[in-house]
């Protein structure tokens, strides 16, 4: 690359067309941290004394998030769930996460769901009719929310980037799903027994997060989950990538535009009374939460 860094005029290592900018390594890392700081301040996500539980899979986004939160001075503990996504993939995810934590002396909580409950993600799909990633996502959301509440954390941080959020928004808009649109936000306030959930990478693209991880020397898991085929979000991402190629900045404009002008029109569409799940105690609008119902369905299908 022959471009010069927009900030210091040194040789650039990355060009960001959507910002009409190029950066050398130190200036890109500065840019990345500034974007995270801006996200945290703008959406009032965290304050320095908060104890944050970071969902870490071993992939680039979650490890980059953990790294940048620690760099910014937050008290951030990692939380890794060993899932039933295939023996090699699951052990590789854990190995990358554990090595990252050990090298930096960070606290990591490992929750071995494979050990605790003996059903697999494909089995969940068969027993419940949910999509593979839908079932897996529900498991992950439930387990980290429960752990954060049980252990008294102030917030849960998730490594969703701009590409993830824009793809979810596209899916919600295609269905005009008012309930999901009312809840789509980089920060979900903690109430009714839920711990606050934040997405500090929402201003950064997947490519920018990968570049940050690479430039910080983070050894992340590169392989994709063997169960990802059929994930609808990947199709929406491909559509948005195609638009972004000819209109740099379109993805950010789509998502940020929704936050600034669209979200307010859907507020209140999701108001439901919550109570404690009869089985696990987590807040739910029903007697038993979706996670516990899913587990019951698997048990029944076996019986
Ligand atoms: Fe779970 Fe789907 Fe992610 Fe695999 S790709 S870890 S099945 S959500
Ligand atoms: Zn429950």
Image: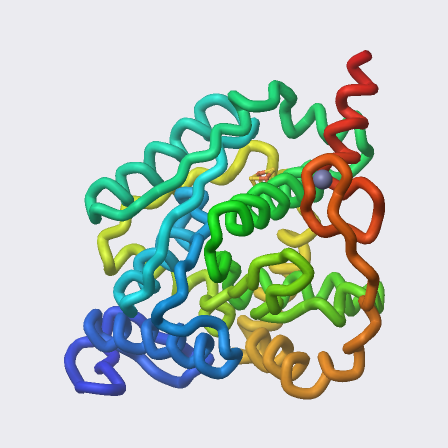
In the picture, measured across the screen, residue 183 lies left or right of residue 117, that is right
Residue located 64% across and 56% down the image: 193
In this rendering, the answer to whether 226 lies above or below 174 is: above
In the picture, measured across the screen, residue 77 lies left or right of residue 142, that is left
Q: Is residue 62 visible?
A: yes
Q: Tell which residue pokes out farthest to the left in this image.
A: 10
The percent position of residue 46, horizontal first and vertical second, equals 44, 71
Residue located 62% across and 76% down the image: 255
Q: Quadrant of the N terminus?
A: bottom left
In this rendering, the answer to whether 296 lies above or below 260 is: above
Q: Is residue 212 visible?
A: no
In this rendering, the answer to whether 257 lies above or below 287 is: below
Residue located 28% across and 55% down the image: 214
The percent position of residue 15, horizontal first and vertical second, equals 34, 74
Quadrant of the rendered image holding ligand 2: top right
Instruction: Say which quarter of the image contains residue 2.
Output: bottom left
Q: In terms of depth relative to the viewer, which is nearer, 223 or 83?
A: 83
In the picture, measured across the screen, residue 283 lies left or right of residue 216, that is right
Number of numbered discs visible in the structure rendering? 0
Q: In terms of depth relative to the viewer, which is nearer, 137 or 153?
A: 153
The percent position of residue 108, horizontal first and vertical second, equals 35, 42
């Amino acid at each position: 690359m022959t471009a010069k860094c927009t900030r210091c005029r040194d040789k650039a290592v990355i060009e960001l067309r959507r910002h009409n900018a190029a950066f050398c390594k130190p200036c890109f890392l500065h840019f990345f941290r500034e974007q995270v700081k801006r996200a945290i301040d703008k959406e009032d996500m965290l304050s320095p004394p908060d104890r944050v539980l970071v969902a870490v899979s071993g992939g680039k986004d979650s490890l980059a998030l953990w790294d940048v939160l620690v760099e910014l001075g937050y008290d951030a503990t990692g939380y890794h769930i060993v899932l039933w996504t295939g023996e090699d993939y699951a052990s590789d995810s854990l190995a990358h996460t554990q090595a990252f934590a050990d090298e930096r002396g960070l606290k990591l909580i490992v929750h071995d769901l494979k050990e605790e409950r003996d059903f697999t993600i494909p089995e969940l799909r068969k027993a419940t009719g949910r999509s593979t990633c839908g079932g897996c996502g529900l498991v992950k959301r439930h387990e980290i929310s429960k752990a954060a509440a049980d252990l008294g954390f102030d917030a849960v941080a998730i490594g969703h980037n701009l590409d993830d959020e824009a793809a979810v928004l596209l899916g919600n808009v295609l269905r005009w799903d008012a309930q999901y649109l009312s809840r789509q936000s980089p920060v979900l306030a903690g109430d009714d027994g839920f711990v606050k959930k934040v997405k500090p990478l929402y201003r950064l693209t997947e490519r920018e997060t990968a570049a940050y991880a690479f430039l910080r020397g983070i050894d992340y898991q590169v392989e994709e989950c063997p169960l990802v085929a059929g994930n609808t979000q990947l199709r929406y991402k491909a559509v948005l990538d195609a638009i972004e190629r000819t209109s740099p900045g379109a993805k950010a404009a789509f998502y940020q535009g929704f936050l600034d002008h669209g979200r307010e029109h859907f507020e209140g569409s999701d108001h439901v009374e919550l109570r404690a799940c009869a089985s696990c105690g987590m807040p739910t609008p029903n007697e038993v939460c979706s996670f516990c119902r899913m587990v019951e369905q698997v048990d029944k299908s076996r019986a």
